[in-house]
Amino acid sequence: MASPIRILTAVPICDGHDSAINTINLEFIRHGIEVIYLGYHRSVGDIVRAAIQEDVRAIGISSYNGGHIEFFAEVVNLLRKKGADDIKVFGGGGGTITHDDAAIMKRKGVEEVFFAGTSLDDMMKFVHQRYGKPRAKRSQAKSFDQELAHRLTEIEDAAAGRKKIRNSKFEIRTSRRSRVIGFTGPGGAGKTTLIDELVLRFLNQNPKGRIAILSHDPSVVGEGALLGDRATMINSQDDRVFMRSMATRGQAGGLSPATHDCLALLARSEFDYVIIETVGTGQEAMPFQKNGIVDLTVLVMNPDYGSRLQLQKIVMLDLADIVVVNKSDLQRARTAHTEIEQRLEQNRPARGSLGEGGRSQQLIDTVAKRHRDPGVDRLFDLISSGNLVGRDRLARRTKGSK
Amino acid sequence: MSKLGQVVESVESYGKFVLDQVKRARTDEKFGRELLGRWNDIKAKIPITRTPTGLPLPRLALPEIDETGEIARYLFGEGLPGEFPYLNGAYREMYLEPVREIESFERNDAVAAGVSPANRIKTQPARLPPQEEPTRLFSGLMLAEDTNERFHYLTRHQRTHRLSTAFDGPTLYGIDSDADGVFGKVGEGGVAIDTVEDMVRLYDGFDLGSPNFSASMTISGPAPIIMAMYIAAATRRFGPKVVPKLRGTIQADIFKEVQAQNETIFPIEPSLRFLTDMVEFTTREMPRWYPISISGYHIGEAGSTPVQQAAYTLSNGFAYVEMFAARGIPVDQFGPRLSFFLDCALDAEYIALARVSRRIWAIGMRDVFGAGPKAQLYKLHTQTSGRSLIAAEFKNNLTRTAAELVLAYINATNSCHSNSADEPFTTPSEEWIRLAAHGQAILLEESGIFKHTMNMLSGSPGMKAVERAVEAAILDEFREIERLGGVLSAVEERYQRSQIQNAAHRYEQQIYDGTRPIIGLNRYRDGADDIPDVKLARTPRSKQQLQVDRLAKFKKKNAEKGKRALDKLAEVVERGENCFPSLLEAAEVCSLGQITSRLQEVVGRFRPMV
């Protein structure tokens, strides 16, 4: 089975008209397409960066606020400049784009412009016909990010059974320097916002550092997926952030069949940190158990988890190095903190057997949506201090010392 | 319970109050007699007007009732036009033509009985014709001087100058024209404003302090900054004494931006805080200014149902009132300076949407917020629906807009904008703008539907049925918002947003499957689409470059002072004080983008909701 088509959609800078694109995104998903949605009010640089990192087949731009001739042309030109003109550009803008405009835009390299009244079916047909065929062989990548993106695509394609890849090529290098932090937790707990806030702190503290994010969203039945994390991120639209969105493509447990290899590749690609975010997970999920690459795991909880008995069933409460109660401005947050604290207490005796000092899980309250939230500051300090050694790494170390 | 919950209760208990009055009018003989007396008195005082064919008509139409209970139901439940709870109109006469001949009610009987017209009593008009031409054409293009020229052209024959300003994308998002990747957007779809100098150029030649001048600025995210620039520009030209005389309005509606229009630049709470800072200032220093226009239009255009539009607009309004009152601004001071803006499309709800809104607002303002009569008025501007206009066989759009105008006037909107039929294609052209404006004139001046008699089309059984259904549905929406912890929590939980998106999706689906007939599109389509002759005013690159160059010069000239002003502004915001006075200082020497980014450093940026 081939990999689904990946498309990036966005609305240009200074334009908030997202009604049309929302409808079109849903239609893409229904037709088996994976849509990386970047959101509205996005600059040319943000769009091209994301398209290259996500290694999409095409960019769909929905523009209703004028300036489309320049904007579309700038996207095409920047793609060319970055050696990424294998990524095509199409779009529309209802009645705001005239036929004359469209002719100019096509001359400037835009593949197709849809006018008011185009049926969704016609758009879907266009995308399938134009971008559904296997990619032609690509020339040498022009940048590190592009090379990385291409190789991540190869891994995803291999997992989808399209190509064979020699396993050795993606082996984990033991002397890697990235720290890999895993974020998991139920949907709606605020993982993406929290990560975006941590990225802001990282970028401020490390003027030259780089960070990678591997984010996951579920595929829906029939292959398509809406990968929308980027749309709500404001700090991660930065050249020093490499982000890749993956669809789970039918695999349960919060990750994709290709996650392990992709993460391994990112982990040895000399980022200071690699952050991996699972889809919203259920109680029994333990997404990072098998892959052995994650150094530190963070469970992000919503204060509304139900009765305290529910806590007994959440496996990640045994495994996570840090438990975050996000949205701690909610009324229930204090109760949640107390109950989770007690739940973590249960884990302590077992820790003793791990050897010197055991390890203590940390519990932190955050309000990720709040600017300069002190809870997020604490979480960042905890992660960046490196003092907290994750369970996985500790286990490996213990093994190694034997 | 939040204030919105109390509003629900107040509307319900007002309903009970009306029923009680009905009962009392029927059982309490004295009360009933008084009511009947008042009713007959009202009827007796209604002036008579004469149509061009000579038919005498009362200037106010009332239901044919003489039973005391029904009289009570009408007077308390609806109110006469201009009387609480204002169901029939915020003012007494609305669109009525100036009185030419007035006769007493008794005379009318005499006329009908064949008494000679010479016996008619002629009196002076009870009310002078409106002093202002209602024209306020939305305009904004290219650079400030281009828009200024356009303003002068549009108002060249008018005594009163009512300017309505559209801003370009970068300005709406608080970004400078020299920002990365916005060059092509400079001056597109509106005027480019970066600095106080642009603001001076924009309104050059107009007497900003004159009672015949008013400026409307359609901008929300950076509204307090743009407001500060406007005041700074006015002060530069006319000195500080002009400030209390400034008239006009700025949109500044943060809630609807987050719910529907996506032009928000700071997180919600600081956005609301800056807004309140501005309202506190204008209420105190600029008594003739309308500091916020509470807008349902964009909610409707984003795809909401009519009920959602009315409910979210009202609840947003009540949330603002609660917020301003919590700041200590007296409700009777800011209340009369609030105004509303609704969409009017073709769904049945629009027969009474604004009528019901006016009633709920009046009851809530009076009974929950203790507002006096002036602060109870839901002053409404209506625009016909842009979304209802389609490209296929676009000339049908004239009919759609005309029908929407009729609905808007039935609702006694205070002012109205009619869309041009060529809107689905482009910024409207002169030809179609003229037709749209004439649509209003034909209905109000040429036709006899609205100019002779108030309530001409009000009060039909169908309209009453729509009123009841719409009011119940709006209160249901209020209850849901209340259950979510009030407007702010509901907004943060994306409640309104998801409801609107869902409704938009359903609407598209209905068009697609034909259950929502759109003539010329999914019904009676002949396939041949005509396209209007589109001439677009695009901003030349040379102008965009000029704007960028000017901005660079301004920044260089004010580098030192600008930095100090921004530092001070940041400190004030950090301390949690009203930042508007510091914004005024900063507006003198800083660009819009500089102020926006500095404020964002302190309070953060808006995180988009999807």
Image (tube, coloured by chain):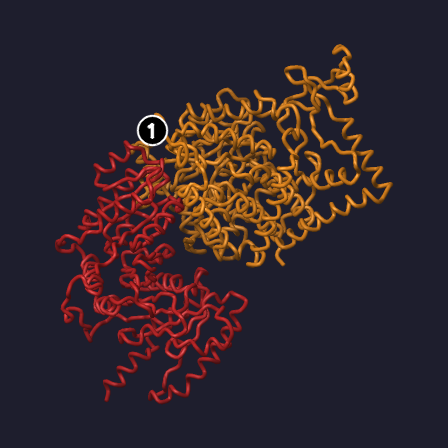
Chain colours: A red, B orange
Residue situated furthest right in the rendering: B30
Q: Nearer the viewer, residue B232 or B510?
A: B510
Looking at the image, is B263 positioned above or below residue B123? below
x then y, percent, for residue B380: 58, 37
Query: Does residue B35 show up?
Result: yes
Quarter assignment of residue A386:
bottom left
Element on which disc 1 rests? loop
Q: Residue at x 66, y 33 (%)?
A: B91
- Identify the residue position indicated by label 1 in the image: B528
> Label 1 amino acid?
Ala
Of residues A11 and B40, the one drawn nearer to the viewer in this rendering: B40
Give the letter of the chain under mark 1. B
Q: Is residue A268 above or below residue A4?
A: below
Judging depth in this view, the residue of B588 and B388 nearest the camera is B388
Q: In this rendering, does residue B586 appear at all? A: no
- A276 relative to B374, above or below: below
At which x and y percent is residue B107? 78, 18
Give the quarter of the figure containing the N terminus of chain B: bottom right
Residue at coordinates 32% horizontally, 63% vertically from top-left?
A216
> Residue A166 falls in which quadrant of the image?
bottom left
Q: Nearer the viewer, residue B288 or B118?
A: B118
